[in-house]
Image (cartoon, rainbow, N blue to C red):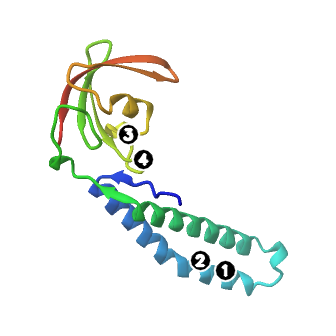
Amino acid sequence: MATVEKMPMLQEGYEKLTADLKRLKTERPLIVDAIEEARAHGDLSENAEYHAAKERQGQVEATIADIEDKLSRAQIIDPRDLSGDKIVFGATVTLLDEDEKPVKYQIVGQTEADAKTGRISYNSPLGRALIGRSLDDEVEVSVPAGDRYYLVSKIEFI
């Protein structure tokens, strides 16, 4: 029997997924109305509005199923409840790059990741390289642009 893998995420990620799910579920009846209206226009084989509405319906249903799956497997983690000297999911880490320039990242779930805002997935190359590391550890990461080297200078649980 297959085991269901938990999906770690922060509370705000869970709330965002829940809001997306609610929005999509309210879109469902509008799509059905659009399909009915397009059907009333006659010949379905050449009816672009009908095909577009049916395609959108398929996309929405697939997205709803995906979000419901993620929410059912969600394991909500509050970083403020964590402590320790090792990098774990939810930790905010300050790294020094090769030029001694500090960069700050929070280790988050896949659905919450946004590198532009300093949030990286625990499954990303850098996220995987950081998990389990301690203060003053050197980290080597292979990325498409080449190998990068970092020094862990600070670990916070905020």
**For marks 3 and 2 on the same chain, the one whose residue lies earlier in the sequence:** 2
Sort mark 4 into few (<14), some (14-19) or many (20+) by Cα contacts within 10 Å: some
Amino acid type at circle 3 is: Tyr
Residue linked to disc 4? 110
Using the image, tell me which numbered label, if any, was put on residue 31: 2
| Residue plotted at (30% across, 42% down) | 89
Amino acid type at circle 4 is: Gln
**For marks 3 and 4 on the same chain, the one whose residue lies earlier in the sequence:** 4
Name the side, left or right, on which 51 lies relative to 116: right
Using the image, tell me which numbered label, if any, was put on residue 105: none
The kind of secondary structure element at disc 3 is: loop
Q: Position of residue 32 (x, y in %)?
A: 61, 81
Task: Name the image quarter holding the C terminus.
Answer: top left
Q: Of circles 4 and 2, which is in front?
A: 4
Q: Quadrant of residue 36?
A: bottom right
Distance, label 3 to label 4, CA atoms, is: 7 Å
The kind of secondary structure element at disc 1 is: helix
Q: Position of residue 80 (x, y in %)?
A: 16, 48
| Residue plotted at (67% across, 84% down) | 37
Distance, label 1 to label 3, CA atoms, is: 41 Å
**For marks 4 and 1 on the same chain, the one whose residue lies earlier in the sequence:** 1
Q: Of circles 3 and 2, which is in front?
A: 3
Residue 19 sits above or below residue 96 on the image: below
Using the image, tell me which numbered label, if any, was put on residue 122: 3
Amino acid type at circle 1 is: Ile
Sort mark 3 into few (<14), some (14-19) or many (20+) by Cα contacts within 10 Å: many
| Residue plotted at (72% across, 75% down) | 50
**For marks 1 and 3 on the same chain, the one whose residue lies earlier in the sequence:** 1
Residue linked to disc 1? 35
